[in-house]
Image (spheres, rainbow, N blue to C red):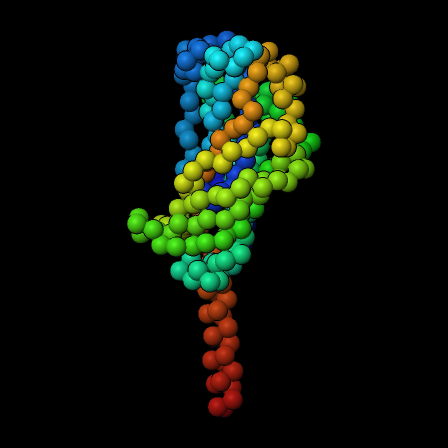
Amino acid sequence: MFFNSHENLVLKAALIVAGCLACSSTNEKVDGAPASATTPTLPESNVTFSMSKWMDEAGTQKIPVTGWFSEVSVKLPPGLDLGDSATMLGTQVEVVVDTSSIETGNALRNENITLAYFESAQAGPASIAFTVSQVEPDAEGGWRVSGDATLTLRGISASLGEALLHVEEAGESLHVRTLQPLEIRSETFAMPVSALLQRCGHLGIDPAAFVEADLLVPLDDDQGEDDDDQGEDDDDQGENMDN
């Protein structure tokens, strides 16, 4: 099944994407707090990132930069049953992030990162494939899920290592959140750091961004409907045989 984050999905699998980004604006302070705050509302389902830009060549003075991606889509396999750990092993969940949907609270920075760093128009979206290796109940009444997270960004695929997730049922959805940030290094995905620095006038940026996800993913009830339809067909067949 394919869901769009605007339909209130949430998945924290390990997924996820982002890079080491940031662009300065004239109203930013060295402590990272904008002089005039313009912080949009964080979506209920989101993939967030954090990193820093450098104020000196040595990187000893930094300004933290944080943001999120509002366009997140999740593909879940049908018949997902977290309670059956045996069938969950090897299950793959895909999270797709539209890198042009970045929001940092600064329109110019958003544009610079989209055009010069992600090259979103040419490279397209980023995706994370999460392959389950272990599922076990946790103290919060949900499940602790671990597995390998592989990011595809700008046409390059590479493992981000083990991702740890907390997953719990929330009504007719799954609430998924990462238990620890995923580290994404710019060199691994050949990110055009120099192009971003030239466009923004920075002295440097951190070599890695740290990404987290907090997603609400509607459960697929199509399988249940299909099973009900099959049951009705069997009943009809039985009635026809009786007649």
Q: 234 or 102, which is in the foreground?
A: 102
In front of the other: 157 or 17:
157
Of residue 60 and residue 231, the one placed in the foreground of this image is 60
Report x, y in % for residue 165: 43, 45
243 is higher (above) or lower (below) than 151: below
Q: Residue at x 50, y 58 (%)?
A: 89
Quarter of the image where one finds residue 117 = top right
Left or right: 207, with 141 as reference point:
right
Q: Is residue 187 above or below residue 213?
A: above
Q: Quadrant of residue 121?
A: top right
32 lies above or below 243:
above
What count of labels does the image hold?
0
- Residue 99 in percent (x, y) is at 57, 32
The front one of 80 and 203 is: 203
Task: Name which residue lies at 43% across and 38% down.
Answer: 180
Q: Residue at x 49, y 85 (%)?
A: 238
Q: Position of residue 13 (x, y in %)?
A: 47, 45
**Residue 108 visible from this viewpoint:** no
The residue located at (39%, 55%) in the rendering is 136
Residue 99 in the image: above or below residue 22: below
Would you say residue 233 is visible in this rendering?
Answer: yes
Percent x, y for residue 239?
48, 85
Q: Residue furthest bottom?
A: 243
